[in-house]
Image (cartoon, helix red, strand yellow):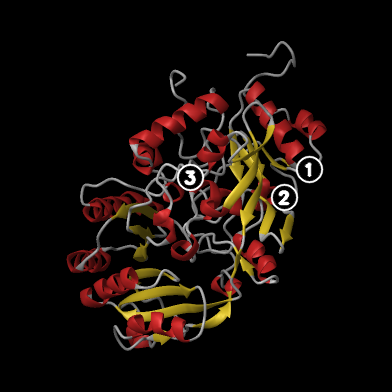
Amino acid sequence: MVDTNTGIERGTVPVARLRALVSGRVLVPGDADYEQARTVYLGGMDQRPAVIVQPADAGDVARVVALAREDELPLAVKGGGHSMFCLNDGGIVLDTSSLRDLEIDPETRTAWAGAGLNACEYSKTAAEHGLVTGFGDTGSVGIGGITVGGGIGYLVRKYGLTIDDLLAAEVVTADGRLRQVDAEHEPDLFWAIRGGGGNFGVVTRLRFRLHELGTVTGGLLLLPATPEIVAGFVEAAENAPEELSTIANVMPSPPMPFVPEELHGTPIVLAILVYAGEGEAAEAALAPFRGLAAPIADMMQAMPFPGVYPPEEEGFHPVAAARSLLTDSFGLDDAKLVLERVASSSAAMPAVQVRVLGGAMARVPADATAFAHRDRKILINVAAMYQNPDEAELHTRWADELTAALQKGVPGVYVNFLAEDSEARIREAYPAGTWERLRAVKRAYDPTNLFRQNSNIPPADEPR
């Protein structure tokens, strides 16, 4: 079908028109940097967008969004490239990693940040002022994507989710308008982007609250994995002061240089602990974990906050069957099950990750943001990394079955960790009242469902 106004066939991307519209870069197959621009963190993703736009500013974003809506073109948004929904085949990808401005005001302890910055870049600059905002657990994650889904990281128990420090944002909605939203300006949209994912527009800038924190204490702790040690670790994390957030990965030991060769392949707890502070209080908080067993390796120490984001292996693009769930308990029987299932997996690297939540995150009212699972106590990720594509179904079944067993019949999932199961499980990310309110906001700001690429919330059929 040809648009009578433009003479362009709908569904085809008008590259020349895009290049005339935007000041940023417009990349197509064959252009220098196109292959790099479509490379993402996850392996096994080989989508080939017709065009990748790296906008110079929010105005470019608005023009691209308006064109995609008018010409009915597939649109995806890519920031740090950690989402499996950030590419498409034959459509437009808005690569917001080009939006990298950062203005920190130490007096008000606030920052305006371009949505394309990653967590490590933001944190290093903030640390120059002795300030922090909590994001996730990986430095290369884009701050725009992790924020709109909630943001669970190393400071979640001390300062809450990333969205709990989001004060305002600039968002390009489906009508091509750039809107500044906060608690007083378009509060429904501000509520929705704090946990509702990328369903409501393209976030171009974010205003965050910063906290005074010069030094944290923590790092890597490797323990042998028995049911008692795994369950004891989770219990210690639940009883720890709110300054301490933990991540425990139950897995076979990879051949790391600091692990004795005879332990390679044996079950371990590879844990990362971060205490928001230093000194005697930090050491006291870490002591119960060191006391669970003689550590295989103990690399915990005081460091500036950006030290929690170690250098990442260049060219590492894991392929995995991955699932996520929220649960309210994890005891000895769960630990036994996890160790049995990890041992039974034929994947190159099976792992179960357990994070204890609570603290500041749980004190925010459930209806204050679109992230409403404030009362859930534990976040678990199940993953099986593999190399042979023919084994995908086998490892996916393993992940699905273990997820169902650990979930114990009570649904719940973190929207940022949904994978190809997103269509079936998106409702688990939101309680019923939150879901209906999100659908109403979607209808108001994106009635044609332009932003359907990610874990999608459809518009309500009728206005509320």
Coordinates of residue 430 in the picture (x, y in percent): 38, 40
Task: Name the secondary structure under disc 3.
Answer: loop
Q: Residues within 10 Å of mark 3 (few under 14, many from 20)?
A: many
The residue under the point 47% across, 65% down is: 158
Amino acid type for the residue under numbered disc 3: Gly
Residue 320 in sight from this viewpoint: no
Identify the residue position indicated by label 1 in the image: 24
Figure quadrant of the C terminus: top left
Q: Marks 1 and 3: which is nearer the front? A: 3
In the depicted structure, whether residue 339 falls above or below residue 185: below
**Which circle's residue, 2 or 1, is located before the other in the chain?**
1
In the depicted structure, whether residue 178 falls above or below residue 121: above
Q: Considering depth in this image, is 369 or 249 the residue closer to the camera?
A: 369
Q: Residues within 10 Å of mark 2 (few under 14, many from 20)?
A: some
**Which circle's residue, 1 or 3, is located before the other in the chain?**
1
| Apparent side of residue 244 relative to residue 171 in the rendered image (left or right) | left
Task: Name the secondary structure under disc 2.
Answer: helix
The residue under the point 56% across, 49% down is: 145
Q: Residues within 10 Å of mark 1 (few under 14, many from 20)?
A: some
| Apparent side of residue 92 relative to residue 257 in the rendered image (left or right) | right
**Which circle's residue, 2 or 3, is located before the other in the chain?**
2
Coordinates of residue 207 in the picture (x, y in percent): 65, 50
Asked if the residue under mark 1 is in contact with the one under mark 2, i.e. CB atoms within 8 Å, the reply is: yes
The residue under the point 61% across, 33% down is: 91
Q: Marks 2 and 3: which is nearer the front? A: 3
Which disc is residue 195 wearing? 3
Instruction: Place residue 347 in its image quadrant.
Output: bottom left
Identify the residue position indicated by label 2 in the image: 98
Coordinates of residue 156 in the picture (x, y in percent): 46, 61
Amino acid type for the residue under numbered disc 2: Ser
